[in-house]
Amino acid sequence: MKTQPTKLTEAAVTPEAVYLNRRQYLKASALGLGAAAFSGASQSADDGQLSDPAPLWMKTQLNESTASPFSTNEALTPYEYVTGYNNFYEFGTDKSDPEKYGQGFEPHPWSVMVSGAAEKTGTFDLEDVLKGLSVEERIYRLRCVEAWSMVIPWLGVPLSSILARYRPLSRAKYVVFETVYRPEQMPGQRAFFNAIDYPYIEVLRIDEAMHPLTLMAVGLYGRSLPNQNGAPLRLVVPWKYGFKSIKSIQKISFVEQRPKTTWERANPREYGFFANVNPKVSHPRWSQAEERRLPGSLFSANRIPTKMFNGYANEVASLYQGLDLSVYY
């Protein structure tokens, strides 16, 4: 697998204010986080938005994060866009709803139920799920199926490191993820008319789940995940459309047969199982050949060409050899 390490130097490391005085982070000489990317983000960090309610053990783990060679050196999307422009229907369907209505959500304490074809199953406290694993800072492109995109500095651990702890059996062909169901804290789940059924379910093939690029994110921009971004645990699969990156995960199952995902059940014509970013396959209602990189404006939409597999073709194209990607979309 070919990787494209970032080429930025220590001189371009993000200002300390953005990363909450994370001394471990600033000591590293090859971190590759560009200060030039943060002119807007730095300001939002200074506005006091980054107070972090995470427990001490999580803050400690985040503060010890290291740089990842998988990071892109593209300009970051400012913090206020990353946290204020979201799809998280559990809190509402407008882009501003997750930030507005997610404040009453309680992501701590948290546990994860692991079941299915694995040697080790049960319910585990989040601290035990993450204990001893090294957190990495990974700057990934995020491409939404709605044809907008961001560049986000995630904090997380390789999903493979978590799944390996539960020793999946050879018959496990898929990994199923399920979002927490808390209608008392998530107003979208208790709405009378819902676009989708809850709880939200996503699925990866086992080889996709174990791929080095697949990340279980626990933070962004130097702090734990805000509620609207999927606190405390969300999937990040950077070569797939964003709806595959399920948020607020509370259940993980290893299975032999693939269940349908939430969006497959809701609208299989528009939301295929693989959801690989593909500029050659249009959404039924719009082209995917271009994307709107946020932030933009009325006079400058900031449109850029969409890349196959969201720019990660060198790393992941081999997973789909022999598949007709216009059929298996």
Image (cartoon, rainbow, N blue to C red):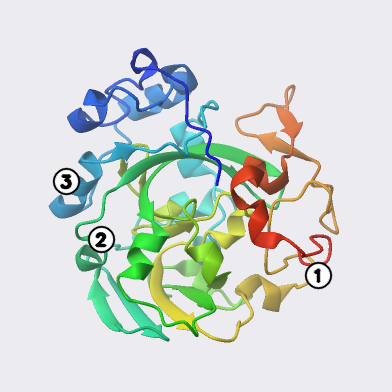
In the image, taking residue 291 as reference, residue 92 lies left or right, namely left
- In the picture shown, does residue 64 fall above or below 39? below
Q: Are marks 2 and 3 in contact (CB under 8 Å)?
A: no
Residue at far front of view: 1
Q: Residues within 10 Å of mark 3 (few under 14, many from 20)?
A: few
Q: Earlier in the sequence, mark 2 or mark 3?
A: 3
Residue holding disc 3: 60
Residue holding disc 2: 130
State the SS at label 3: helix
Residue at far left of view: 56
How many numbered discs? 3
Q: Quarter holding the C terminus?
A: bottom right
Q: Amino acid at mark 1?
A: Arg
Can residue 205 be seen by looking at this rendering?
Answer: yes
Q: Amino acid at mark 3?
A: Thr
Report the residue at 54% width, 66% height from top.
207
Q: CA distance from mark 2 to mark 1?
A: 37 Å
Residue holding disc 1: 269
Can residue 182 be seen by looking at this rendering?
Answer: no
**x and y percentages locating residue 261 in the rendered image:** 62, 75
Q: Earlier in the sequence, mark 3 or mark 1?
A: 3
**x and y percentages locating residue 2 in the rendered image:** 56, 41
Nearer mark to the viewer, of 2 and 3: 2
Residue 223, by quadrant, is top left
**Front one among 145 and 314:** 314
Q: CA distance from mark 3 to mark 1?
A: 44 Å
**Front one among 152 and 319:** 319
